[in-house]
Amino acid sequence: MANIKNVLIMGGGLMGKNIAFVVSSVKEHRVTIYDINQVDVEGGIRTSTKELVEKGVVSEEELAERLSRIRFTQDIESDEVKNADLVVEAVFEDMDLKRETFAKLEARCRKDCIFCTNSSVMSPSEISRDLKWRNRFVGTHFWNPGHLIPLVEVVRTDATDDATANTVMEFMTKIGKKPALCNKDVPGFIANRLQHALWREAISIVERGIADAATVDMAIKNSFGLRLPQLAPLENSDMVGTGLTFNIHDYVLAHIEDSHEPSPLLKQMLDEGKMGFKSGEGFYQWDEEKIAKCNADLNSYLIRMLYNK
Ligand SMILES: NC(=O)c1ccc[n+]([C@@H]2O[C@H](COP(=O)([O-])OP(=O)(O)OC[C@H]3O[C@@H](n4cnc5c(N)ncnc54)[C@H](O)[C@@H]3O)[C@@H](O)[C@H]2O)c1
């Protein structure tokens, strides 16, 4: 693998800071966050990693050492930009802004610098459309919270070369992530296609009055959701037998939601101002206390699952 030492993160928002924290886990890495706006990198990383420190996953000394490997710049002409070995772009989700950002980078970075975009939905082929050296460009979709969720989808474009894909896969492993190579640049990559196939059916069950939202979520949490981290669908299919899987699909697939549009129920909720956490009502009722508990419970759960703490 190409020797990746200097890592540049474009955009120091929610994802950029957490990605910087993850990259800083390797002692020889030097991480720079570039942002057009002033960013409190240390404050942001300290806030998002508070529970990791409290639960003893990361010591205060280690956090301080990792923070010392992360610099911040607002200077696009700086040596940190010119000398980057690998860039992860995490600016706003805007196609023109992402294209402009990579055009600026291509004019300044070395020709062998690897370019990654953290876009969660936009096609890396489209983002890299106007670049000269498209072979060194790849999607790297970190999941939120970026410092906890292990998966990073490494998405090949129509032009990504093998060396780039292999280097990025190895880099992600080195920083402690579980990289999944997505061989085709398709909307939703791998995991969001899977996730939203389930959400579509969950919403459809509520819409059709088969069960209410709380019952749908409870059914998932207390059945296959419980065993998913241990037994994923394709392993499960082999366990029960592909013949049984075939027979079940032969019977049930005709009845499962296959709409290619967002659910009318979602549209109705939006029209009624039911926007979830944002408005205090969605499928459930939310207030500040419930929202804080939901976020804290998720972080605690992930840390327990990942670090046994
Ligand atoms: N938030 C999520 O759950 C999530 C998950 C996975 C992927 N992503 C993707 O990561 C990217 C960043 O998302 P986020 O949630 O961190 O956004 P964010 O709004 O928290 O941060 C974006 C940052 O980009 C900076 N920025 C804007 N224009 C810039 C420019 N020209 N040059 C440099 N920096 C610039 C902003 O100042 C801001 O700090 C998006 O592409 C998003 O789709 C987000």
Image: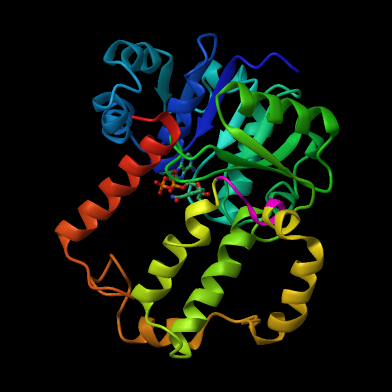
Above or below, 175 relative to 191: above
The answer to whether one can see residue 75 in this image is no
Q: Quick check: can you spot residue 49?
A: yes
Q: Quadrant of residue 49?
A: top left
Q: Position of residue 293 (x, y in %)?
A: 22, 52
Q: Quadrant of the N terminus?
A: top right
Left or right: 81 as drawn, with respect to 222: right
Percent coordinates x, y for residue 22 in the rendering: 47, 27
Residue at the (37%, 81%) spot, across then down: 212
Tell which of 54 and 158 is nearer to you. Answer: 54
Is 188 inside the magenta-drawn segment? no
Magenta stretch?
230-235
Residue 52 higher or lower than 26, as above or below: below
- Camera-side residue: 308 or 70? 308
Residue, x 35% and y 13% (percent of image)?
A: 62
Residue 231: in magenta span: yes
